[in-house]
Each structure stands twice: as C-alpha cells, then as structure tokens.
Image (spheres, rainbow, N blue to C red):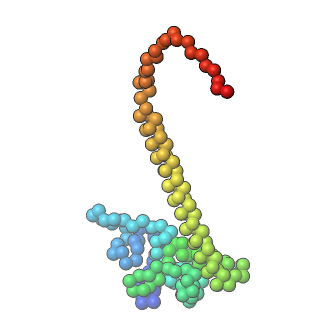
C-alpha cells in the first residue's frame, strides 16, 4: 500500500496527517508554503481524516461512524460539500465510545450522557481556572494599590505643635 486510498468518487485521499501534506481543501500542495504563506498548525482538533480513514483508525465500520454522528456521540467537522472530517480527538472519542459500549456494556444513550457530563466538567474546570486567574490578578492589583498608598505617605514630615509650659497648679476633685 502506498499511503493513498481511493475515495468514493475515485480521487485519492491521504491516510493520516502527513506533516507536509496540508489540509484537505486548503489549496496547499506538499511541503511548506512558499512566498511567505501561512503554514497550518496541525493539532489534535484539526479535522483531517475522511470517514473511511477515521473508520479504519478507530476500528469501526463507516456506517457506525455515521450513526454516532446522527446520535450526537461524535460530531466531526464538515467540509463545504458536507463531507465529514474527523480530527485525532474525534478518533480517540470514537475509540472511547467503542470501549464503553463493548467492555463496560453501556448503551449509546448512557454514553452520550457521559460525554455531555465530561464536556460540562471540562467547561467548568476551565471557568474555575479563569476565575482563579482573575482573583489572583485582582489580589496583585490590590496589593499594588495598597503599596502605592503607603508609598504616598510623607514619613519625613511630622506635625509639630509647640507645647506651652506653665507653672499653674490645678486641683481636681471628683463630683459627688
């Protein structure tokens, strides 16, 4: 096998990311862009795999991937022609859905709820981290304002009051 697979329309599609191959539909050929073009950053969220490749990488049938998409278990990105494009993270999620279904015996509705709750936990953790950062920066700002106020005190000037000394004697008697 030469690293290519023929798709449903007869065009050749890459199997895997291929570091110099560019993204499907990006207009980039092999290798880095020339003439100051912007290179794409491939991350785990970059949708690069067509459904046949995603099925092969996840060990599932393409119809199963379509069913999971319809159920909302794994939602790949779409191309302009409505074709599915799976990312590395989608592949991992497909494997996890298969594991939960096969090994743990959880039905698809349960798996969907687990995924929703995991996404909610991740969003809440991100929000907590964001709020912790805001609290820390607010504490630093308050400390800086406090230091500025203390620095504004004039410690070299002390109010002076001349005390008048007298030799008068005062007798004090409490009232009854």
Direction right: furthest residue: 104
Q: Quadrant of residue 175?
A: top right
From this view, report whether residue 94 is shown above or below residue 153. Answer: below
Tell me what residue is drawn at x 52 percent, y 72 percent.
88
| Quadrant in which the C terminus appears | top right
Percent across and percent down for residue 89 are 54, 72
The front one of 90 and 119 is 119
Residue 112, by quadrant, is: bottom right
Q: Position of residue 148 (x, y in %)?
A: 43, 38
Q: Residue furthest top?
A: 167
Is 5 displayed left or right of 115 in the figure? left
Q: Is residue 130 above or below residue 8?
A: above
Q: Residue at x 52, y 80 (%)?
A: 75
Q: Nearer the viewer, residue 112 or 147?
A: 147
Name the one closer to the observer, 141 or 14: 141
As drawn, the residue found furthest toward the front would be 176
Instruction: State the residue at coordinates (61%, 72%).
Output: 118
Q: What residue do we see at 50% from left, 83% from top?
A: 51
Q: Is residue 87 above or below residue 138?
A: below
Residue 166 or residue 155, whichever sits in front: 166
Q: Residue furthest left?
A: 35
Q: Is residue 176 above or below residue 90?
A: above
């Amino acid at each position: 096998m030469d690293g290519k697979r023929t798709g449903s329309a007869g065009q050749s599609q890459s199997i895997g990311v291929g570091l110099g191959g560019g993204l499907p539909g990006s207009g980039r050929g092999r290798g880095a862009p020339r003439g100051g073009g912007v290179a794409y950053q491939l991350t785990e969220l970059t949708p690069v795999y067509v459904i046949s490749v995603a099925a092969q990488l996840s060990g599932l049938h393409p119809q199963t991937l379509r069913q999971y998409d319809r159920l909302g278990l794994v939602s790949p990105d779409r191309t302009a022609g409505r074709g599915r494009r799976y990312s590395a993270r989608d592949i991992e999620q497909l494997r996890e859905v298969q594991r939960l279904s096969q090994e743990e015996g959880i039905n698809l509705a349960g798996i969907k709820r687990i995924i929703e709750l995991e996404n909610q936990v991740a969003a809440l953790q991100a929000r907590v981290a964001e709020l912790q950062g805001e609290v820390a920066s607010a504490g630093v700002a308050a400390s800086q304002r406090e230091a500025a106020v203390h620095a504004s005190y004039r410690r070299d000037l002390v109010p002076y009051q001349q005390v008048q000394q007298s030799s008068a004697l005062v007798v004090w008697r409490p009232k009854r």
